[in-house]
Image (cartoon, rainbow, N blue to C red):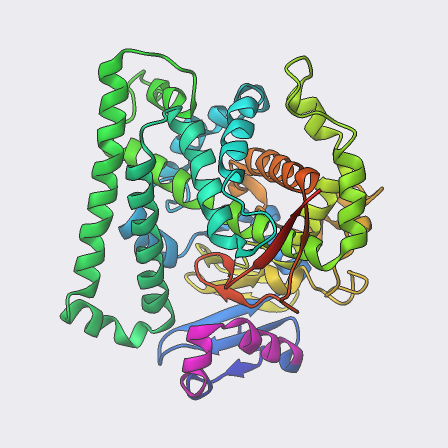
Amino acid sequence: MNNLKLVSRFQVLKNARRILKNPLPFHHENFEAHGDSFKVQLSTKEIVLFTRSPGLIKYILQKQHKNFEKSPLQTVDLAKYIGHGILTSNGEHWRTHRRMVQPAFHKKKLHNLMGVIRKAIITELKRIKPNSEQDVFPLMGDLAFQVVAKALFSSSDIRERMARLKQITEANQRMLIREMRQPYLKWWYNFNGKIDRHLKMAAEGKQLLLEIIEERRKSGFEIDDLLDMLLKAQYEDGSPMSDGQLLDEVLILFTAGHETTANALSFTLFLLAKHPEIQEQVYDEVSKVNLGDANVDLMQEVMQLHCVNHCVEEALRLYPPAYVIDRIATEDESFEGIVLPKDSMVLMSIYELHRYNDFWEKPSEFIPSRFRGMDKKDYGDYYYPFGAGPRMCVGNNFAMAEMIIAIAEIVKKFQISSSLASVEINPLISLKPKCVPLLFKER
């Protein structure tokens, strides 16, 4: 990496406060100053490569993915709070459990869950207060959490425990962000007991899930929800997952599954509120379908909502939940003159790639029609809302179906607007909005 510009540790420390709050402007300034790739010195020994290069990102995530793995930011730091599941593991452990979890998200299984997803969405949307402005972000958080809970557990009596689990995961995420952006204070967080307190909260969350799982086992019922599929999943020798591994996978499905969807829904609704002409195009489309008709195939109806789909895709382009993806080189690598020695760390800015000036026309503007008539191969090298390669998000189809149904049901019932000129972003583990006040006027 010696041929790239270096951002010194002094510059990092000088900007520590703003990096803790939101590192994306700092990233952008350095990309503009130094090009598509640059180095950052985090300590006397640790140097990280930052890149928005389409070619390098594709090389790492797809072409040469076998020589790159997730960094300790996920496999150690994040894993201590949510366990070693498919999101936070590498190597054979990841491959084995990915094969076990993947069938639960096949399109045939998703087809069977569509009614459950819509029912959960309709129930949560009853909490919208017509003709008054409210912050939609916590509402979408609750909606997405309940959708995952219903799809996993098919139970109606777990809302209180799910609310507590949501509190725990959000509190632990805030703690993890402090650890990651202020690594020089880790000793203090250990000394004053903060990390220990959050680890105890993580253990409490797992205990809540274990209680729900044990209740299912004792009931003897087979409901064909995601939990049933995971309980039936087997290793090659025919043995099931241990309770510990099952808890890790379920907790990761909760954390990743609800959070990224809540973020994307909030951003999409805000963008539609600020673009009434596009919102009306969505209304015209959704008013022609009846997602609640028992005589229609819900999956087929959802697949016909092209305008809604493009709006979600465009919101994911502007505000990708996984705004940065990290990898560690497991072998000496090089790409177009950029040398990546073994054990070097790369942070790939998906946020910057999705706004890449040399490819996207008017990259900062909300233009859903840009996806009309385009095949994914036309823009695939510049668009990674769910990652790419073998580690692409296992629940991407589930998330897209959920978001399309939610947007369709909201716009069909309400005309939405906002007093907010622009949304303030809050980059934590995923890219969140800070506050999204929307006015819902009944149609």
- Give x and y (percent) for residue 30: 59, 79
Q: Tally the marks.
A: 0
Q: Nearer the viewer, residue 225 or 383?
A: 225
Q: Residue furthest right?
A: 373
Q: Is residue 418 left or right of residue 96?
A: right
At x 54%, y 47%, the residue is 129
Q: Is residue 200 left or right of residue 16?
A: left
The residues colored magenta run 12-32
Q: Is residue 357 above or below residue 139?
A: below
Q: Is residue 226 visible?
A: yes
Quadrant in the picture for the C terminus: top right
At x 30%, y 56%, the residue is 172
Q: Is residue 199 above or below residue 206?
A: below
**Occupied quadrant, residue 13:** bottom left
At x 81%, y 38%, the residue is 284
- Give x and y (percent) for residue 310: 74, 44
Q: Residue furthest front?
A: 131
- Give x and y (percent) for residue 363: 75, 64
Q: Nearer the viewer, residue 353 or 165?
A: 165
